[in-house]
Image (cartoon, rainbow, N blue to C red):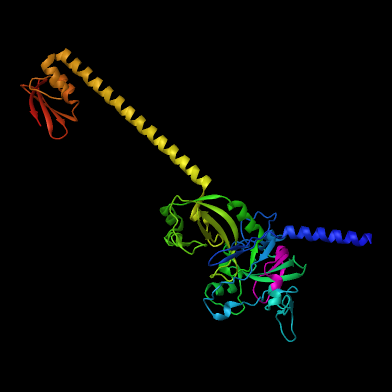
């Protein structure tokens, strides 16, 4: 009896712990759409969603996801197929009960992939209910160099120049402990390229994108740590709408600006225009139903007074539209400091200009007085005003007009003549050191 009681207590404690671990999901209703649940966090920094490694990077880069949790996104109820009516329910043909195996059939010389069973007969509602809204832990990742004709191998076994075109994730369904295998192409393979070119085949093949835009690659999973990272970064933060010119510059076009003028209030359905400088608060980070995506989509919910809008952070960079209030205040402070510095620089320029003007005026008065002292009031004032007269000496001419640019000298039996050349066809003519002619 005591053993049974201890067993029941342990069972309840374990169930309570599991519920606390996997209950980080919020549900939100909006007029055109509905929003849903979310996962918890991990040791992974969560800076990106589940994405493909960069071109030229070794497949070992995928190992960072081992130990992370995935959340299988629920199917959107408001999704409207744009390609074919058969797109309403997509069969889940990418989850299997056992890993891929390569075999050599009789009378053949190449390996072929042995067919493996779909996880819980995926494609029917039983399978869908067992995976949607569920958390999965990544236990291991293997890859192969091509979609067909090669075996999956450990990531560390890839050569230096080899790339993984196809991946197989070993997952544990945390709701029932089942082990399953998810096979997915990476960005750049024929499967992903065909999808991007509009080939909507019945298998609804998806792939790992090079960016966080997993909704564009038809991805059914969301990395839990990435979602939680967005909550940590944005929830309850105040955001300021960027200037229209800045949005154009960040986008190198006008598409984002047009998008900003067509935001929809999720409560009333009215069009909302976001004016530059407006303050919006992120009140929720959640999954919402969308008529444009087959799976529920991650959204940031922004509120400004009685208006609420949603922003799909997975497919756009929020920094292209908004800046955090702290950044805005820093910009205001920096701009205020720049204005203060510009004002101080202008005041300093004006002060120096005034000092220069005063010094120049004092110098002119000093020279005028000096000229009057040496040559009398009449000639002194003429020279101070920059004038010349017949009969002046060379010293007086230099005091009035300054040094000439060139001097042409002529010596005759009657004496010595000089032509002082100034700019602008202004010339002075001297005979024996006395000014005899003026040309201007």
Tell which of 327 and 28 is nearer to you.
Answer: 28
Q: Is residue 139 magenta?
A: yes
Q: Is residue 157 visible?
A: no
Give me the residue at 8% from left, 28% from top: 438
Q: In the rendered view, does 269 fall on the left or right side of 22?
A: left
Q: In the rendered view, does 184 fall on the left or right side of 80?
A: right
Residue 187, x across and y down, in percent: 59, 68
Tell which of 184 and 418 is nearer to you.
Answer: 184
Give me the residue at 41% from left, 35% from top: 340
Q: Quadrant of residue 100?
A: bottom right
Q: In the rendered view, does 306 fall on the left or right side of 286?
A: left
Q: In the rendered view, does 439 fall on the left or right side of 258?
A: left
Residue 312, x across and y down, in percent: 54, 61
Q: Furthest-bottom residue in view?
A: 107
Identify whether 354 is placed above or below 184.
above
Q: Furthest-right residue in view?
A: 1
Q: Is residue 324 magenta?
A: no
Residue 38, x across and y down, in percent: 65, 61
Question: Start and end of the magenta stretch?
Answer: 129-156
Quadrant occupied by the C terminus: top left
Residue 79, x across and y down, in percent: 56, 72
Q: Is residue 182 visible?
A: yes
């Amino acid at each position: 009896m005591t053993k049974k009681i201890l067993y029941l207590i342990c069972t309840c404690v374990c169930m309570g712990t599991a519920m606390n671990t996997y209950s980080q999901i919020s549900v939100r209703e909006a007029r055109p759409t509905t929003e849903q649940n979310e996962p918890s966090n991990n040791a992974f920094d969560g800076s990106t969603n589940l994405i493909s490694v960069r071109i030229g990077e070794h497949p070992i880069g995928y190992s960072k996801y081992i130990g992370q949790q995935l959340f299988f996104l629920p199917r959107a109820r408001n999704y409207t197929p744009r390609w074919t009516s058969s797109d309403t329910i997509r069969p889940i043909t990418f989850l299997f009960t056992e890993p891929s195996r390569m075999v050599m059939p009789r009378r053949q010389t190449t390996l072929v992939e042995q067919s493996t069973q779909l996880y819980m007969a995926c494609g029917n509602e039983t399978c869908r209910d067992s995976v949607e809204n569920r958390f999965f832990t990544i236990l291991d990742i293997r890859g192969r160099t091509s979609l067909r004709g090669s075996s999956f191998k450990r990531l560390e076994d890839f050569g230096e120049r080899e790339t993984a075109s196809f991946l197989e994730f070993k997952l544990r369904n945390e709701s029932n402990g089942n082990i399953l295998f998810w096979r997915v192409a990476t960005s750049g393979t024929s499967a992903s390229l065909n999808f991007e070119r509009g080939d909507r085949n019945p298998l609804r093949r998806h792939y790992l994108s090079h960016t966080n835009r997993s909704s564009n690659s038809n991805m059914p999973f969301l990395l839990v740590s990435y979602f939680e990272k967005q909550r940590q970064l944005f929830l309850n933060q105040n955001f300021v709408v960027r200037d229209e010119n800045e949005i154009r510059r960040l986008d190198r076009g006008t598409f984002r600006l047009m998008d900003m003028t067509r935001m929809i209030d999720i409560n009333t359905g009215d069009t909302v225009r976001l004016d530059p400088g407006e303050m919006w608060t992120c009140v929720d980070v959640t999954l919402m139903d969308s008529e444009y995506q087959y799976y529920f989509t991650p959204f940031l919910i922004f509120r400004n007074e009685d208006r609420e809008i949603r922003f799909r952070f997975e497919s756009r960079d929020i920094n292209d539209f908004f800046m955090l209030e702290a950044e805005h205040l820093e910009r205001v402070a920096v701009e205020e400091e720049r204005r203060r510095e510009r004002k101080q620089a202008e005041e300093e320029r004006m002060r120096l200009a005034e000092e220069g003007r005063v010094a120049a005026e004092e110098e002119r008065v000093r020279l005028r007085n000096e000229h009057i002292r040496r040559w009398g009031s009449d000639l002194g004032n003429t020279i101070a005003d920059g004038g010349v007269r017949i009969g002046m000496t060379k010293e007086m001419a230099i005091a009035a007009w300054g040094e000439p640019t060139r001097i042409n000298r002529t010596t005759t039996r009657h004496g010595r003549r000089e032509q002082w050349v100034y700019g602008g066809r202004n010339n002075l003519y001297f005979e024996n050191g006395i000014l005899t002619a003026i040309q201007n």
